[in-house]
Amino acid sequence: MITYLYRKIRKALFLISVGLCAVMLMAADGDYSQTNKISLVADYITSDELGYVFVVKDNQLAKYHPEGNKMYTYSNLYAGDISYVDTHDPLKILLYYEAFGQVEFLDHTLSLTSSTIDLYKINLELANLVCASYQGAFWVYNPMNFELVRVNSLLEISERTGNLQQAIGLTLEPNYMLERDNFLYVNDPATGILIFDKYGSYYKTIPVKGLSSFQVFERRIIYFIGDEISIYDTGLNELNSTSLPWNDARSVSVSLGLKPQRLYMLSDEDLFFYNIN
């Protein structure tokens, strides 16, 4: 089963690399077809590269099939509400609980793969952002000293940036971060998206401001504002935008590793499933 999933992941990554450049053209005329709608109330959604949808409500995480069938659920009643879900690795999903300073890793069935990680025990209790990193590690942002810290799978600090305010001359108040393709993306709504390499060395800042979240595929930043989906190519420094099926969703996510590619939109009472034709 695990081997089969890895094959699907490799196939998904290939499809992303050949299909991402065309996603804006495919949806240029709002060419979406709704495939399902589920009544539910949730805080936000995300998706993985295999097209599965993850729905967060308070302290519960639910996983849905791309066609809309509910598959698995997980909740930890003792850790508070889920602050962040990182699904980049479908076999090692990261959950972060900011209120209690805890990190968990789940497998593809939303079962715990190891004991809950207490950031207090590794002297990172002041962290306000956490995201997954390669080889089972994770990044932490400590706002008290403006520092990014990478913790490896042995819960040892493998990389740290030092005070970013001193290093790059910016006062940061980041609200979101993720690592993709050996780059770390840190979002500051007032400054833009700061990009660091896998060792925490500053690379550049993307001048897209006012965001609360985004996705990254093949070094392209995908974000949603109002009724538009936008893609910023970090290599070419080009921005393209097109319309979404409707305006003011609570949360939006895309999955580009399938044919057809998928779009998921969460309203106050429903989760909508679309194909990008």
Image (tube, rainbow, N blue to C red):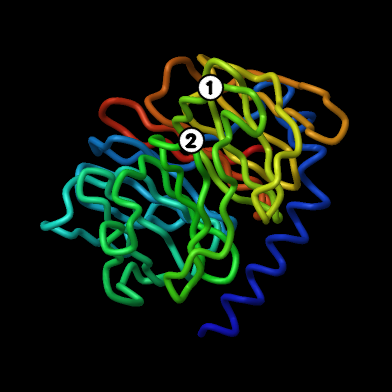
Asked whether the residues under the numbered discs 1 and 2 touch, taking CB atoms below 8 Å apart as contact, a structural biologist would say yes
Q: Looking at this view, is 147 or 276 the one in front?
A: 147
The quadrant where residue 76 appears: bottom left
- Total labels: the figure holds 2
Q: Amino acid at mark 1?
A: Thr
The secondary structure type at the circle numbered 2 is loop
Disc 2 residue type? Phe
Residue 133 x/y as whole percent: 56, 59
Q: Nearer the viewer, residue 234 or 246?
A: 234
Question: Residue at 78% of width from left, 33% of height from top?
Answer: 234
The quadrant holding residue 120 is bottom left
What's the distance in space between the residues labelled 1 and 2, CA to CA?
Answer: 8 Å
**Mark nearer the N terminus (1 vs 2):** 2
Q: Is residue 258 left or right of residue 116?
A: right
Q: Residue at x 35, y 53 (%)?
A: 124
What residue is shown with label 1? 171
User: Which quadrant would the C terminus be assigned to in this image?
Assistant: top right
Label 2: few (<14), some (14–19) or many (≥20) C-alpha neighbours in 10 Å: some
Give the side of residue 52 with respect to residue 179, left or right.
left
- The residue that mark 2 highlights is 146
Identity of the residue drawn at 64% across and 68% down: 9
Residue at left offset 37%, top offset 45%:
84
Vertical side of 132 occupied by 221: above or below: above
Residue 131 is situated, as x and y percent measured from the top left of the image, at 47, 51
Where is residue 32 drawn, in percent x and y?
A: 61, 31
